[in-house]
Amino acid sequence: MTSPSAPSEGTRLAAPRAVHRAGESALLAEYPDTASVLAAAAAVQALDPPHLVDLVPAETTLLLSGTAARDLDSLRALLDHLPAPGEEQSAGTERSIGVVYDGEDLTEVAELLGLSPDALIAAHTGATWTAAFGGFAPGFAYLVPGDVPDASDVVSAQTDGSGSPGPPWDVPRRAEPRTAVPAGAVGLAARYCGIYPRSSPGGWQLIGRTEAELFDTARTPPALLTPGTRVRFTAQRAVSRLSATTSALARARSEAAAVPSRLARRRGARAVPLEDARPALEVLAPGQLLLLQDGGRAGQGAIGVSTSGAFDRGALVRADVAVGNSPRAAVLESLWGPVRLRALVPTVVAVSGAPGTLTVHRTDPEVGELELEPAEAQDHAIALDPQDVLVIGPPTEGLRRLLAIRGGVRGVRRTTADPGPGASAGASTGASAESGAVLGSLSRDTLSGLGPAPLEAGDVLLIGPVHGLDAVPDRAPGPTGAERESEQEHASGADERSPSAEAPSLRIRVHAGPRDELLGSEALDALTSTQWTVRGDSDRIGVRLDGPALPVPEGAGSLPSEATVPGAIQVPPSGLPVVFGPDHPSTGGYPVLAVVTRAGLDLLAQAAPGSTVRFVPAG
């Protein structure tokens, strides 16, 4: 292959049509078609730049996420000088998937396309489909009909405008989406074919079903259909149409039979085996929502897996540093509270995030109880003895409090029948079961369901070894003044949250784009001049805002699906912005007007319903 540093003009891919900034450290590149996107993605993957965190292809765009703002110039230059990938790099994997063509919408779809059901099946199995990009759910691939050209074809097509249109597969979505589409359902919508990896609501037209396992966290890669994979469907005949219950039982038997081998693979894949972890804390009361979160699972956007991780990353770092952990070690993230925990061994903990009280009920009567006011409880290492009970009070301001344990959380031991994703033992016996990392992270993704399930009373937290960790500092460093003082202005309200208390006002910095030009300067000016109110239906997926609707020019309300990043301010047709949180969908079809800075996203993590927000341009 030609050297990446000096490719010849004949083997170089055309530069993208446009490149837009997408937040502090990401770029969104536009290409004329899906083939060009996949060729560029293959070329970038072949170069494997060290500062690239994630690479997410979509229908006509490619998202490149770097480690910091300083990476943007080098990523932009890389896109302008991409060598065409060799045949071994541009040729995708080929998969054959058997389908029983008995979907509820088969006859209706055939009529829409002017075909008989048999002719539709013949056309569907006769086409070669290509996984263009992922999204919607982990393992869900948007398949386009027809072969995607190889690198040499892309180079010539970019210069002479040639191309080969595929068959007319443009099928409208259902007017009324189904509340539940079964896992394995094969559907058509717009110009795509897709297979639902798990049961979920959906509006695609269903033409059949398959038993293929689209997503398995024990597999490498976990998604069966990664971008660039070619797919051929083969018709399978069912002896009889299975009922939903029978089908579910058959799938359950199949999954149960595969458990032993999967558990063995999962044990072997863990960086730190749970066997090396030890019990530290027992959950007595989890509060409203208690999750495990860490630095997240970056680099999986192409298969529909978002980064997830702690919403307030600054609080994650401060809590971990306070107990001597690495700054991305897993912690507990509590929503509202209060949370009650019992120490099982001598340990050290620290709380960060939203301010609130902290109480330790000591078992030794001579020591007495420890009661800390909000200012004293933050980022401060606290030693616990066995049977001490720690009470993390509800926030006096904000939403989320994070608890770090020295050694870092490595998993959770449960006594429930269903241990959730990542179970490693005892799932079918009713005995204790241990849940560990999924795709390298303990973070619970509330959209996809990846990671250990929300913690419940009786769950036991397992921690890693403490030898080799940093010493516990006298006092952990507080938030950096440059980040907090420049972005946050608290309103003068009551010290306690109550219906009558004045909610805090936040000033959040944003970078315009990537679709500010599409939506226009009027929309961007309205975004930054409006005082927005945080809605009560906000969560880790998105912070939803109320206020006057942003102006959306005609034709700009929707786009071909493209990758998004945490902090993206998406503008749906209603004109009311939604700021994506850590569990956001990896792709979306509404334009993104601006992207919140990382420090600003930390502030939004603590924005309770009723809080007011003003967006200001980042310098």
Image (cartoon, helix red, strand yellow):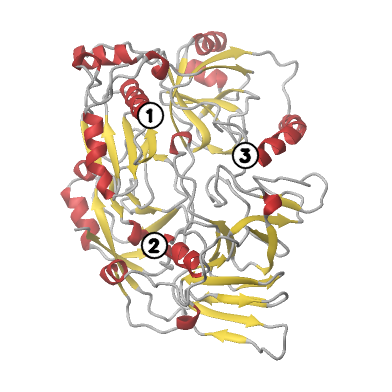
Outermost residue toward the left in this view: 521
Residue at (60, 81) in percent of width and height: 359
Instruction: Say what secondary structure mark 3 lies in.
Output: helix
Which of disc 2 and disc 3 is earlier in sequence?
A: 3
Q: Which corner quadrant of the image does residue 505 belong to? A: bottom left
Instruction: Say what secondary structure mark 1 lies in.
Output: helix
Q: Looking at the picture, how far across and down is residue 351, in whole percent?
A: 52, 71
Which of disc 1 and disc 3 is earlier in sequence?
A: 1
Q: CA distance from mark 3 to mark 1?
A: 23 Å
Would residue 73 be found to the left or right of residue 449 on screen? left
Would residue 351 be found to the left or right of residue 218 on screen? left
Q: Nearer the viewer, residue 414 or 317?
A: 317
Mark 3 or 2, closer to the camera: 3
User: What amino acid is at disc 2?
Assistant: Asp
Res. 502 mark:
none
Determine whether 106 is above or below 181 in the image: above
Q: Looking at the picture, how far across and down is residue 96, in whole percent?
A: 57, 15
Residue position for label 1 = 45
Q: Nearer the viewer, residue 474 or 452?
A: 474
Question: Dividing the image into 4 quarters, which one contains the C terminus?
Answer: bottom left
Res. 269 mark:
3
User: What amino acid is at disc 3?
Assistant: Ala
Q: Looking at the picture, how far across and down is residue 134, in whole percent?
A: 45, 32
Residue position for label 2 = 602
User: What amino acid is at disc 1?
Assistant: Gln
Q: Looking at the picture, how far across and down is residue 51, in whole percent?
A: 34, 41
Q: Which corner quadrant of the image does residue 314 belong to? A: bottom left
Crowd class of label 3 (few under 14; some 14 to 19; many from 20; radius 10 Å): some
Instruction: Say what secondary structure mark 2 lies in.
Output: helix
Q: Nearer the viewer, residue 453 or 84?
A: 84
Q: Nearer the viewer, residue 113 or 163?
A: 163
Q: CA distance from mark 1 to mark 2?
A: 31 Å
